[in-house]
Amino acid sequence: MEGRVGSLYRYPVKGFTPERVGAVMLEAGGNFPCDRLYAVERGPSGFDPDTPAFISKWRFTVLANHPKLARAVTAFDPASGTLSLKIGEWIEHFDLHDHAGRQAFADWLAAYLGEDEEMGPLHLIEAGPRHRFTDDCEGWVSLINLASLRDLAAKLERGVDPLRMRANLYVEGWPAWAELDLPTGTRLRLGESVAEVVKPIPRCIATHVDPVSGERDLDLVPALRSHYGHGLCGLYLKPIAGGGLAEGDLATLVPAHPAELSP
């Protein structure tokens, strides 16, 4: 099974818009670079930066509970810590390396989302050097097979924007749904890096939200279950050998023998 990397995306602030990147360096045992570095708590989440641990997405502002986040287009500069935000013609900038800047962003977001009695006070929190605010405790890197989405779109007789899946890595050239036949531990060469399949990704109602309009316009999870008998789409991967990864690179199965894992 051989394909190529169609596109790469990171999500610096959990729940907000994706940023396309041309190339990254993956580290063994590491997450996708600059991905889910920050999250906005909906009231105290219990996150402890000294002993970071997985916390459910429902403790944060995400598309599943706030679809209109899709309309707030963001871009993050890791060097300066500046988060740029645009809605229509209005542009604002926040310094996420600074406590006051993080609180200013949270205050803006509270005003944008409006009153929500279940929301609680908003606070932007940082994951730290080794933690990430992924939807799964084993969600190091997420992958989508674009042929699978095209197959679903054909059954639905309508387009399905791949960005509904909020993945890091989109692959062209694999047979539709072949990724779900890969057992846990299967090794994939991704550019110069190697990653292991962890498990398929169960989808949630965040995929029901159009990533441009911010409207819930497609019941994608029921559609998956109706047409395929499951609610899965994509894979979680764990990098086991670091290296460069760029758009256009090969995405293919590799032998499992350790001697053959070097890039």
Image (spheres, rainbow, N blue to C red):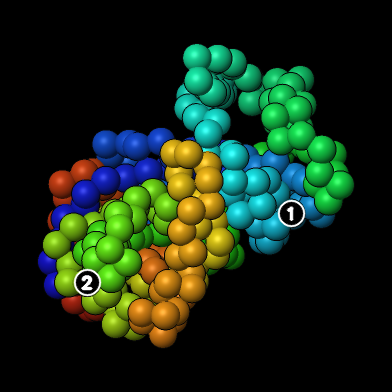
Residue 261: percent from left, percent from top: 23, 67
The foreground one among 201 and 256 is 201
Residue placed at 17% from the left, 67% from the top? Answer: 174
- Marks 1 and 2, how far apart in space? 34 Å
Badge 2 marks a residue whose secondary structure is loop
Residue 128 at x, y = what percent? 64, 43
- Left or right, 140 with reference to 42: left
Residue at x 55%, y 31% (from the top left corner): 72
Ranked by sequence position, the earlier of labels 1 and 2 is: 1
Residue 188 visible here:
no
Q: Which mark is residue 252?
A: none
Name the residue beneath numbered marker 1.
59
Label 1 sits on a secondary structure element that is helix
**Is any atom of residue 119 visible in this view?**
yes
Quarter of image, res 256: bottom left
Q: Quadrant of residue 153?
A: bottom left
Residue under label 2, please give it: 176
Task: Quarter of the image for the N terminus: give it.
Answer: bottom left
The kind of residue on which mark 2 rests is Ala
Q: Residue at x 74, y 54 (%)?
A: 59
The answer to whether 155 appears left or right of 129 in the picture is left
Is disc 2 surrounded by few (<14), some (14 to 19) or many (20+) residues within 10 Å?
A: some
